[in-house]
């Protein structure tokens, strides 16, 4: 979708633990970009939803709607959602003006090792159903504007690469 203003949407997709939230926060520290984060939305406007394919679709439908409203009012936004299905990512790209899809390509083994919230441990023990990468799919992105391996790049390098998309 085209956009008459300069506002941009960076849509970060990747496994839990791939670095979406950390990179988004780093970018927001030095810019006036608004952050929409999966964990935060799920505590507020999406607290009625779970992790089935349908609920994830509804979660992302709401996130896409908010991001669109912001960009249309000239606020740049960075969205950090697992967004595991290509269909939802395509909808984001088509619905949000100037939307750049950023794929954080961090392997499941690295994410399991990082396990910042201890969720992989619980998912592997069967305590969390439908956990992305363990018992629910993450469809490898096909259509993206940037792919980043957060294992080999520093936080600073990741943030720089994403911000460069603003100029492309
Ligand atoms: S999405 O799939 O609908 O895009 P979203 O990014 O909003 O997911 O939320 C993911 C966050 O929810 C994870 O970072 C994690 O903290 C938490 N979570 C809890 N249960 C699950 C689960 N079954 N699968 C993935 N993430 C989960």
Image (spheres, rainbow, N blue to C red):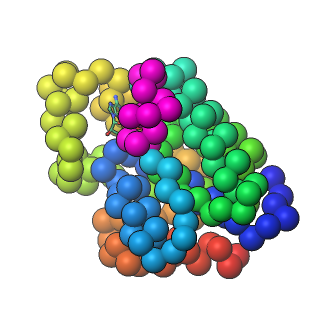
How many marks overall?
A: 0
Pick whichever, 154 or 64, lies toward us.
Answer: 64
Of residues 81 and 75, which is closer to you in this image?
75
In this rendering, the answer to whether 99 lies above or below 152 is above
Q: Quadrant of the C terminus?
A: bottom right
From the viewer's perspective, tell me whether residue 35 is left or right of residue 101: left
Residue 21 falls left or right of residue 124: right
The quarter of the picture showing ligand 1: top left
Q: Quadrant of residue 149?
A: bottom left
Q: Position of residue 154 (x, y in %)?
A: 33, 75
Q: Vertically, is 140 above or below 121?
A: below
Q: Is residue 100 visible?
A: no
48 within the magenta span: yes
Picture quadrant where residue 27 is located:
bottom left
Q: Nearer the viewer, residue 56 or 25?
A: 25
Residue positioned 21% across, 44% down in the render: 117
- Residue at 22% over, 37% down: 119
Magenta stretch, residue numbers: 38-50
The residue depicted at 68 percent of the width and 79 percent of the height is: 167
**Residue 11 on image: x %, y %:** 57, 54
Examine the image and state in which quarter residue 85 appears: top right
Q: Is residue 110 left or right of residue 64?
A: left
Locate residue 3, reporting x and y percent.
Answer: 81, 61
**Does residue 151 show up magenta in the picture?**
no
């Amino acid at each position: 979708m085209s956009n008459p203003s300069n506002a941009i949407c960076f849509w970060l997709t990747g496994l839990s633990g791939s670095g979406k939230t950390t990179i988004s926060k780093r970018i927001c520290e030095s810019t006036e970009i608004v952050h929409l984060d999966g964990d935060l939305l799920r505590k507020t406007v999406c607290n009625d939803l779970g992790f089935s394919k349908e609920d994830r679709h509804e979660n992302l439908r709401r996130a896409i709607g908010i991001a669109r409203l912001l960009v249309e009012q000239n606020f740049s936004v960075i969205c950090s959602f697992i967004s595991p299905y290509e269909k939802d990512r395509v909808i984001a790209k088509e619905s949000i003006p100037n939307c750049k899809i950023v794929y954080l390509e961090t392997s499941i083994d690295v994410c399991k090792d990082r396990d910042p919230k201890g969720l992989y441990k619980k998912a592997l023990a069967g305590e969390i159903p439908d956990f992305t990468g363990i018992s629910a799919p993450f469809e490898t992105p096909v259509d993206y504007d940037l792919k980043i391996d957060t294992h080999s790049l520093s936080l600073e390098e990741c943030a720089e690469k994403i911000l460069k998309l603003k100029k492309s």
